[in-house]
Image (cartoon, helix red, strand yellow):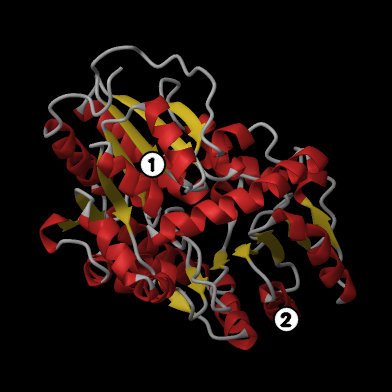
Amino acid sequence: MGYMGLTSGLFLFALPYALLYTKLTERYRSSISQRIGIYPPLNLPVTNSPRIWLHAVSMGEVNAAVPIIEALQALAPRCIIILSTTTEHGQELAKIRLPSDVVHIYAPIDFILSVTSALRQMKPDLLVCLETELWPNWLMIAHRMKIKTAIVNGRISGRAIKRYRMIRPLMKEVLGSMNAFSMIQEIDAQRIREIGAPPEKITVNGNAKYDLLLRQSDSRRPDPIRYWRQIFGVKENEPVFLAGSTRHSEEEIILDAYQKVIRKAPNTLLILAPRHLERTRHIEKIIKARGLDCQLRTCLKNNGENRTAPVIILDTMGELQAIYSIATVVFCGGSLAPLGGQNILEPAVWAKPVLYGPYMEDFLDARNLLESTGGGIEVKDANDLAEKVLFFITRPDQAQKTGNSARRAVEMNQGAAQKHAEVITSLLHSVGQPALPR
C-alpha cells in the first residue's frame, strides 16, 4: 500500500505539468491519453480466444518480442496478441516489424487508476513483461484481477539488482504473485530468486534476440552489402571502422583512436553511430574541433558520389544493424563508460570482429558467448582500441576468421524464442476462462 500511495501522489502531482508540457511541446500528444489508461476503440474480436498482452519498453525489447510473438502464433494460432511499448521509437519499430494482426498500444503509467483502466479495456488472460519490466502496481492489480503474469527473456543486470535489493520486501510481494519467470541466463535466474521470485517458477531459456538477429542477416548476400557500400561510397579494399551506439564521452576516445589509426592506414573510413540522435550536432562540433571533416548520413546521395569526408555520422534510426555489414571492424559503445554496454551480437551476425569496453554488465551473456568462440575482444582505452582496429584492418584474413567465430557463437544459441513462447502457452493452457468478462 505504501508504494501505491507514493506513486498515486506523485502521479497526481505531476499530471498537470505533464499535460502542460505536452500542450506546449506537442511531444506525446498522440499517446498521452493511452499513458493515463484511456484507449480508443481497438476493434478487438469479441470472442473467447485467449488474449496475451506483452509489454516491451523500447526498441531492444521489441526486437526480442518479434520472434517470441511469431513462435506464439504458431503454438496458439487463435490467440489475440496485444503489444505495448513505453517509448515512441519502440512503437514505431513494432508497427514495422510485427504482423498486422498484433494490436499496438502505449503502456499505462504505473499508477493504480491508469493500469486498472487499461486492464479492464484490454481484458488480457496473460500479462507478459519482457526483460526487466517489473512494475509493481501493474503486476499486483493484474494478479487481483486473476490475470496470470510472467516475465520472459528476463534479465536482471548488476546495476538493477542493487536497486531491487533496496526494495526487496516490495519486490518479494510482487514476484510472489507472478506465475512464471523465463530468464536469459543462470545469473539472471539467481538474481531474481534473490529478490523474491519462487525458485520453482524460474527457468533459464536463453536470449530471444539471437533468433531475430540471425534471420535479419540471413539475406547476407552481396546485395545489401553492395547497397550500403554504394551509399557510403566505400571503395574496394577501403577499410571501415564502425563505432555503433556510442554514448557520452566515448566519441572523444574513439576519435583519439581513429587519429592514431589513420597515421598508418590513412584511407580508413570512420562511421560514428551515436545511441541518441539528439547528440548529432554536438558530435559534429567535436569532430571538426579536431580538424577532421565529417558528413551526415542523411546528406549522402544513394550513389555515394558526394561522400567526401573521412568521418560519417549516422543520424538515422533503424539502419545501424544493416550497416554493420560493410564494416571491417566494429566497436560497440556504452562500454567504455559504466553504462552497461550495448548489443554486441548485432555486428557478430554479419561475421565482424567485435570490440567493446570493460563495462558490459547488461550484456554479459552476449559477451560470454562471443568470447567463448574468440569473436569478441575487450579494449581498455583509446590506445588499445587503435591497436586492435589496426590489427584487423591490416590483416583481413584474421578479421574474417575472428568475424566467422563471432557469427558461429550466435548460430550455436538458437531456439530461445520458442522456449519462451512455450512458457507463455503453458500458462495459457492453465487458464480455464477469460480473466475478465468480454
Badge number at residue 65: 1
How busy is the neighbourhood of tag 1: few (under 14 within 10 Å), some, or many (20 plus)?
many
Identify which residue, 119 or 336, lies in the foreground.
Answer: 119
Badge number at residue 272: none
Q: Which kind of residue does numbered mark 1 sit on? A: Ala
Asked which quadrant contains residue 249, the reply is: bottom right
When the figure is inspected, residue 329 is found, relative to residue 226, above or below; the finding is below
Residue 79 appears anywhere in the view: yes
Q: Residue at x 85, y 55 (%)?
A: 308
Q: Residue at x 60, y 85 (%)?
A: 381
User: x and y percent of residue 338 in the render?
Assistant: 54, 78
Please state, as top left, top right, bottom left or bottom right, where the C terminus lies in the image.
top left
Badge 2 marks a residue whose secondary structure is helix
User: x and y percent of residue 119 in the render?
Assistant: 38, 33
Query: Which residue is disc 2 drawn over?
Result: 256
Q: Residue at x 57, y 63 (%)?
A: 328
When the figure is inspected, residue 131 is found, relative to residue 287, above or below; the finding is above
User: x and y percent of residue 169 in the render?
Assistant: 30, 69
User: x and y percent of residue 217 in the render?
Assistant: 44, 44
**Distance Cα–Cα, label 2 vs label 1:** 38 Å
Disc 2 and disc 1 in contact, CB within 8 angstroms? no
Q: Residue at x 67, y 60 (%)?
A: 274
Asked which quadrant contains residue 310, the reply is: bottom right
